[in-house]
Image: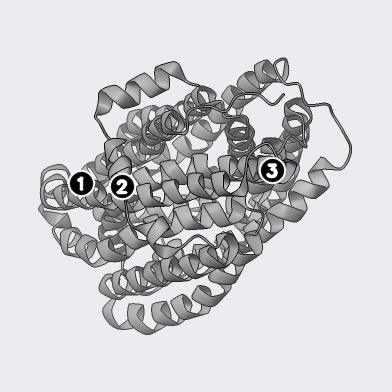
Amino acid sequence: MSEPRRHLGAGAAMSVVVQGGPLLAGGVLSIVIARTIGPAGNGNFALLLTLAGLVAMVASLGLTAGITYEVSRGRWSVGQAFRTTYLVALGVGSIGALAGFVVFLLLQDSVFHHLGTDLGVLALASVPPLLAYQYGDAILLARERYEGYAALEISHSATLLLVGVVLVFPFELTGAVIALPAAAIAGAITGAFLLARETHRDTVPEGPGSLSRALRFGLQSWGANLLQQVNYRFDVIILGGFAAAAAVGIYSVALTMTAVAWVLPQALQTVLFPRAASLDEAALTGEITADDSDAAVAKAVRHSVLLTVPAALIIVALLLIAIPVLYGSKFHESIALGFVLLPGVLLLGIGKVLSSAIAGRGYPRYTLTVAAITMPLTLGLYFLLIPLYDEWGAAVASSLSYALSAVLALVFFRRVTRIGLRQALVPLSEDVADYGGLLNLARAWRLGR
């Protein structure tokens, strides 16, 4: 008999807290940098953070998605996945960091102007441990160990915030960048501890071939993520090549604030992917019906629609209140840029949940198709609008790109699930009733089953 599934609402509620951790840590650190070394320092830190994130994403080979898919379907034991993926993280992470450093040197006179090689080395040193911690995340999520997942994410975010804030005052930008490898190492160590403990609870037997299956699945997701990074991060890179560091800093604040809108849907997306895979496997084996599986997925998508309302209200408050108070008058332009980004950000929040359901059903090739369609269009918009309008061109192009991704995700969601638009997108009274208050969410977390 399979292990009882955790309460999905409890997992999503836990994930909300967890998803907010990196944003809070990054936001506070951004404020400290902006207040101590100004918009240019904030822009340079954003460039280095983007570089490290892109290199880690490329080097990951999409294995996080493959790990979650294989472990959640009971095809890969925790112990075997833990040992194998941490070794992979060390190997491919080191190769990726070296390749990233070559890219840094090639772009040092344009995108990364005024940034020393020591800063590039520090930022890229975070890649191997960052991959290890992300792989640990994937295993814990696949096992629905939401508390362990939260502990792992919080250890990373807390270290980033503590080290960055403490060191930015005596060492300025260098001190902030040191926090990147420090946080990644803390996350990797915490992940190793949690996974070693989880190994003793696991009942899945070890077997051959799980890494190869995870890579085959993950490479499709990796291709989609690789192309999607054009939509999500190349705006900062391209803007850095055409505009001053101060403009990048002002734009990065707008990105940080509007990205808060993704906390709620991304929390749902995070727990939906392994659950959709698990439910699909259960439907194939006859444990549940296909209609039961569809109903659970449709309900999750409807919640993503509901969540756009509080997300929009939160972003408006952050733009109008938080930016003037926390960042000061030098970042006033970030407010208007945030409102340009907001429509696309809200639509993409729904699109992320749709994509998670598509991948969970075993069709990551469709998420790859979405990215393959949007990437060249987005790249064209960036090179058309950014040279002419700097940060304003970046905001318009990004918002349009986000919206297009969401529309295409909906098209392929319908193809994979056959769930009707009304069933997926029109919230029901029972969905609204799920938000009875924070007390109900706390009770769901406490019960856990």
> Do tag 2 and tag 1 residues touch (Cβ < 8 Å)?
yes
Q: Name the residue that disc number 3 marks.
A: 281
Task: Find residue 186 and report its image quarter.
Answer: top right
Q: Name the residue that disc number 1 marks.
A: 314
Quarter holding the N terminus is top right
C-alpha span from label 3 to label 1: 37 Å
Residue at x 11% of width, y 43% of height:
325
Residue at x 82% of width, y 48% of height:
212
Residue 330 placed where, x, y %? 14, 56
Task: Find residue 434 and report its image quarter.
Answer: top left
Q: Nearer the viewer, mark 2 or mark 3?
A: 3
| Type of the residue with mark 2 | Val
Residue 245 placed where, x, y %? 32, 62
Q: Name the residue that disc number 2 marks.
A: 260
| Type of the residue with mark 3 | Glu
Q: Secondary structure at mark 3?
A: helix
Residue at x 42% of width, y 56% of height:
47
| Dot 3 or dot 1, earlier in sequence | 3
Residue at x 59% of width, y 34% of height:
133
Q: Secondary structure at mark 2?
A: helix
Closer-to-camera residue (397/303): 303
| Type of the residue with mark 1 | Ile
Q: Nearer the viewer, mark 3 or mark 1?
A: 3
